[in-house]
Amino acid sequence: MIFRFNTHRQRERRKSPARPRWISHRVIGALTALCLSLVMLSADLYAGSAVITDKHIRARLALMRDQKAALLTLSDMSAGRRTFTPQRARAARRVLIENTRKIPRHFAKERLENNSHARPEIWAHWQDFETRAEAARQAAKQINASSISGLRRSLPTMMQACQSCHQIYRTVPNRAITH
Ligand code: HEC
């Protein structure tokens, strides 16, 4: 018995600080996915600087940027970069529900401009676009804003819903041009 506890490995294990129980592999996996999503979404932060003259296109971009800000608030909270309070989390969740609900209305008419990143396919596949907007609204409703662990579980689905639409209906913003 004594020998078993004195193997080099066992000593090493006892020296290292105990890992808190919540840092399970699943949580690490979820956080990694979250970070990756943020890196992919961060290109969006730079997309707003190009000149857009059409006020309707500007409105749809503002709608998108507002939900981006709400999503950032929630992901900052879930990553511990911002203090979590259920009130603030719920307010951000409400913005996401409201704004995703308005997506179809803001894109209803085909409007394109040089600096817009909307693909014309939106209007050729309008039903699919609407379905993705609705999926995003459902994901927003599913956000659990009552606890950090709830946020951590429910945010990845929200981010995937944003990205699944962007991947198909939005051209990748070129930072060199949009800055
Ligand atoms: C149903 C499709 C769809 C969904 C869902 C969607 N987006 Fe978008 N988003 C677009 C399209 C299309 C554009 C490009 C619009 C343009 O450039 O005219 C865009 C642009 C953006 C932009 C760039 C705004 C700018 O100023 O250039 C941001 C930021 C953004 N979306 C964030 C989000 C976030 C965050 C979510 C999820 C909460 C989301 N979007 C969900 C279709 C979608």
Image: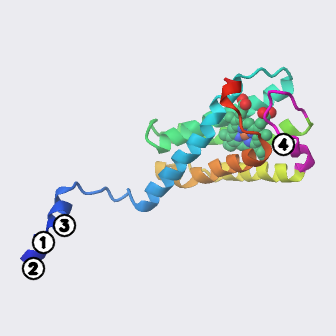
Is there a contact, CB below 8 Å, between mark 3 and mark 4?
Answer: no
Nearer the camera: disc 4 or disc 2: 2
x, y percent for residue 101: 77, 43
Residue indicated by mark 2: 1
Q: Quadrant of ligand 1?
A: top right
Amino acid of disc 3: Arg
The yes-or-no answer for disc 4 within 8 Å of ligand 1 is yes
Please, is residue 9 above or below residue 135 in the view?
A: below
Q: In this rendering, which labeled residue sits more in front, label 1 or label 3?
A: 3
The residue to which callout 3 is attached is 9
Tell which circle, 3 or 2, labels the residue nearer the N-terminal end. Answer: 2
Q: CA distance from mark 1 to mark 2?
A: 7 Å
Q: Which residue is mark 1?
A: 5
Secondary structure beneath dot 2 equals: loop
For the point 84% across and 42% down, which residue is it? 104
Q: Which residue is mark 4?
A: 104
Q: Nearer the viewer, mark 3 or mark 4?
A: 3
